[in-house]
């Protein structure tokens, strides 16, 4: 049976800026867009202050000053270099890797004897060799792995790794997830789902398949099937 892992570098741009500045370990950090116009990355502390993504920087300057937020212009050369280092470690340790974005990669762990142990080893090595913290979600499909990663990131008690295949109530993950947070559901489709009373990922997973295909095309249907544990998104090697 297929098994996927989704590795996500936590608050990646902010983590990169902190890497050589240990004095920022507990301070809120934000990174701004190319023209320093909007917030494009936030540390956990900055998120706790309520600073939203894409927030216009000038509207939040008083918050930055009041809470001593460290503000950085984006440095894509730095981020790209650290991303390459992280992805190289993943490629050395996992059987198959698909780089999804600068701070995310899917692992195909099908057939691995102890995938959780491997993920914990991967996480420890990435942190040790690069200084970048990562979280890893494990599940039977890539869409569920994205959802599992969200749980791994938000719950410190999990130690950065969450195995959705080992839980007693697999639907609990979806019941605790807003429909708009599902990988593949955009704003246009989300409006249709809201109109039908869909609020959570579990609500979406339980919709009639014919309705999903009609209103959201075969792409939306593939997303729903993935939430039901039926793999429909192919794995591509990096």
Image (spheres, grey):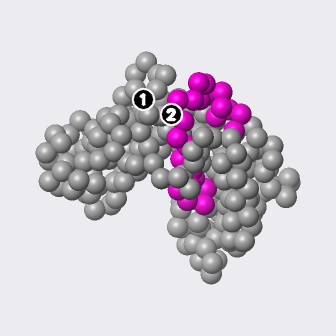
Question: Farthest residue in the bottom direction?
Answer: 35
Say if the magenta span includes residue 120. Answer: yes
**Cα–Cα gap, marks 1 and 2:** 7 Å
Question: How far from the left and from the top, in percent, is residue 182?
Answer: 39, 47
Q: Mark 1 = which residue? A: 1
Q: Is residue 175 visible?
A: yes
Q: Is residue 9 above or below residue 172?
A: below
The local crowd at label 1, few if under 14, some if 14 to 19, many if 20 or more residues have their Cα within 10 Å, is few
Magenta-highlighted residues: 99-122
Q: Position of residue 177 (x, y in %)?
A: 40, 40
Tag 2 or tag 1, which sits nearer the N-term?
1
Q: Is residue 220 left or right of residue 140?
A: left
Q: Which residue is mark 2?
A: 110
Q: Nearer the viewer, residue 128 or 190?
A: 128
Establish if 83 lies above or below 32: above
Q: Is residue 169 above or below residue 103?
A: above
Determine contact: label 1, label 2, CB under 8 Å. Answer: yes
Quarter that holds the N terminus:
top left
In percent of width and height, residue 132 lies at 73, 50
Q: Residue at x 57, y 29 (%)?
A: 112
């Amino acid at each position: 049976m297929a098994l996927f892992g989704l590795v996500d570098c936590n608050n990646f741009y902010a983590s990169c800026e902190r890497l050589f500045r240990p004095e920022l370990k507990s301070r809120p950090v934000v990174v701004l867009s190319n023209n320093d116009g909007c917030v494009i990355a936030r540390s956990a502390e900055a998120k706790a202050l309520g600073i939203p993504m894409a927030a216009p920087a000038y509207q939040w300057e008083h918050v930055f000053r009041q809470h001593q937020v460290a503000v950085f212009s984006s440095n894509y050369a730095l981020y790209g270099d650290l991303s390459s280092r992280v992805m190289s470690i993943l490629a050395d340790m996992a059987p198959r890797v698909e780089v999804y974005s600068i701070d995310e990669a899917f692992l195909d762990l099908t057939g691995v004897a102890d995938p959780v142990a491997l993920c914990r080893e991967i996480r420890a090595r990435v942190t040790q060799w690069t200084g970048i913290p990562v979280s890893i979600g494990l599940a039977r499909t890539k869409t569920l792995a994205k959802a599992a990663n969200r749980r791994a990131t938000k719950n410190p008690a999990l130690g950065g790794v969450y195995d959705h295949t080992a839980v007693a109530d697999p639907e609990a993950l979806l019941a605790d997830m807003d429909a708009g947070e599902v990988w593949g559901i955009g704003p246009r489709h989300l409006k249709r789902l809201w109109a039908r009373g869909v609020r959570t990922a579990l609500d979406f997973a339980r919709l009639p398949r014919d309705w999903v295909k009609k209103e959201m095309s075969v792409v939306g249907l593939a997303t729903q099937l993935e939430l039901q544990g039926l793999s429909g998104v192919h794995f591509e090697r990096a």
